[in-house]
Amino acid sequence: MQKNDSVVTMSAREQRAGLVFLVLQLLVLPRLIGFSVQLLFPKTSITEQNFAVFLLEFIAVLVLFRHFWAGSVKALIQQPGHVLLICLVAFFAYHLMTSQLSIWIYTLMPHFSNVNDGQVGALLTWNFPLIAFCTVFLVPVVEESLYRGLIFGSLLKKSTVAAYLVSVPVFCAIHVLGYLGNYPLDILLVCFVQYIPAGICLGWAYQKSGTILAPITIHAFINALGIFSVR
């Protein structure tokens, strides 16, 4: 674990392990875990398989990045008031940006619907408690550890601009790549754009607070608002 301008970042070893895990997560891990769970427990539902994937990924990032996490918790304990303030500022900035962006999107495309939100909404109707737990508690930890902690934090050591220019598009793309071929490209492009405010504000929260726990908290709160609004 290293620090860069008061930002807790990953060690070189954690970065290498994280990159390997990220590639596996993107290419094979969810399918492999889902297949294994279905093989061992044939009666499991799709929501239970998704839960198994999220839970194992959650455990993996805590183990792989344990020193990074220890430093992040310490940074929070040292200045909780500052971290809370950053969380509030980042969340309201996110809210303002997404509100304005939504006005533009729905003016141009009145019937637009985010495909990823639709998929999560469908899963929620099958097993609300399980998917809600994944969305609010497990997913933010995994995604922030990888896209802010690993990608943003590693690049921040070299260039703040590069940290944003790489981490934001990657974060946006990960939410739409799985839908390629199933939806029109213009719909997916708008979905991509919708995640830009989150990518910027979550990166800023991590940079200014110094701890990955700030963007995790914001991400969890955003997800909670989203899922309970469709309850």
Image (cartoon, rainbow, N blue to C red):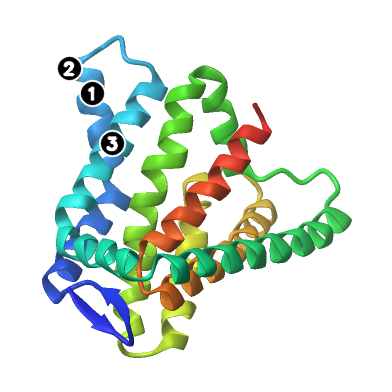
* Residue 199 against residue 221 in the figure, above or below: below
Q: Which residue is mark 3?
A: 55
Say whether residue 179 is left or right of residue 47: right
Q: Residues within 10 Å of mark 2 (few under 14, many from 20)?
A: few
Q: Quadrant of the C terminus?
A: top right
Q: Amino acid at mark 2?
A: Leu
Q: Which residue is mark 1?
A: 37
Mark 3 and mark 1 lie on one chain; the one further toward the N terminus is: 1
* Residue 38 against residue 66 in the figure, above or below: above
Please, which residue is most extreme toward the left here?
13
Check whether the beta carbons of the residues at disc 2 and disc 1 lie within 8 A of each other: yes
Label 2 sits on a secondary structure element that is helix
Label 1 sits on a secondary structure element that is helix
Q: Quadrant of the N terminus?
A: bottom left
Q: Amino acid at mark 3?
A: Leu
Q: Which residue is mark 2?
A: 40
Label 3 to label 2: alpha-carbon separation: 17 Å
Residue 105 place in picture, x, y as percent: 79, 58
Residue 63 place in picture, x, y as percent: 15, 51
Please, which residue is most extreme toward the top here?
43
